[in-house]
Image: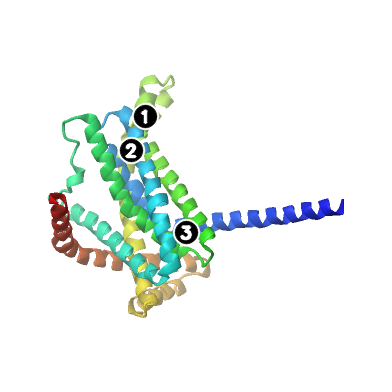
Amino acid sequence: MSGLLALLDDVAGIAKVAAASVDDIAGQAAKAGAKAAGAVIDDAAVSPKYVHGFEASRELPIVGKIALGSIRNKLVFLLPAALLLAAFAPWLISPLLMLGGGYLCFEGAEKVWHVLFPHEQMIDAAPVAPGDPMHLEREKVAGAIKTDFILSAEIMTIALAAMPPSNVWMQGATLALVAVGITAAVYGAVAILVKMDDLGLAMVKFGRLSLTRALGAGIVKVMPGVMKLLLIVGTAAMIWVGGSIVVHGLHDLGWHPIFEFVRHWAEVAAQGVPQVWAGAVGWTVTAALDGVFGLALGVALIPVATRLIGPAIAAVMGKAAQH
């Protein structure tokens, strides 16, 4: 009997350790996912455009295919790469994180540039061309999954950098939870967004109450504004997060002027308001200055990316296709 009680006590102890590990994984995943907010919001803002021009009945299947591709990107390719990086070349995490931050700044600044100079239209903003619908759908899905790979790489790298040191199993479980949770959140939100117009039209058409029909008409009316607002928030988040990553990366590598400048003015602003508002004001000033730096960096990167990196990649891809 005493042996059975001892066994049950051991089982209970193991269960407590397992529960604590699950809590740790969930907590680390939540913190790591929050750090990747800029890329996540951008992912949600970018994705609805891929269903533009298709029949309403194909919108959710397209979103589902892109979501499955995103999960494959994260779990099959990026998660093992992140674990190998953490195990054998952790010194590369900060430079890669800064590279991803620079890309966020460039992408956000490019969107701002297209707003300021609307005559320069982005190619992928064009409507779907006539042709075989299924072929066009496959092309759109493939293009979306390729774009998602870049955003997913940013998310996974940011998440990896935000995690405290731990064993490979904890890191793997945390990254897997981040991958699944963020993909579900992003593409679940995208699915809701792309169907809101249809919901509003259905409420207008089939609603028995005048209030229901009015609410449906309101949904249809406000959704274009909601999509624009999401794009603005996503762009601002990209620039802020990208700038913050680069500023902190430079500080970690030993170059402190920008980091110290941002911290100094955040402290000055926090000291100029009542204590209850100090934290919020300090954070806001820090985010704003990180964003200004991120925008400046992104604008500086536009000619580098469009005139040097872009043509070089196109030339290499062209040669590869010939062979």
Specify the quadrant of the image occupied by residue 192.
top left
Residue name at image x 13 percent, y 57 percent: 315
Of residues 223 and 93, which is closer to you in this image?
A: 93
Upstream in sequence: badge 2 or badge 3: 3
Residue name at image x 15 percent, y 63 percent: 308
Of residues 5 and 263, which is closer to you in this image?
A: 5
Label 1 sits on residue: 200
Pointers 1 and 2 in contact (C-beta within 8 Å)? yes
Label 3 sits on residue: 32
Task: Report crowding for label 2: few under 14, some 14 to 19, many 20 or more residues within 10 A (C-alpha).
Answer: some
Residue name at image x 41 percent, y 60 percent: 82
Of residues 286 and 183, which is closer to you in this image?
A: 183
Amino acid type of the residue that numbered disc 3 sits on in the rendered structure: Ala
Residue 281 image offset from top left, x and y in percent: 44, 66
Amino acid type of the residue that numbered disc 2 sits on in the rendered structure: Met
**Alpha carbon distance from label 2 to label 3:** 31 Å
Residue 268 image offset from top left, x and y in percent: 42, 76
Question: Relative to residue 292, is residue 128 depicted above or below?
Answer: above
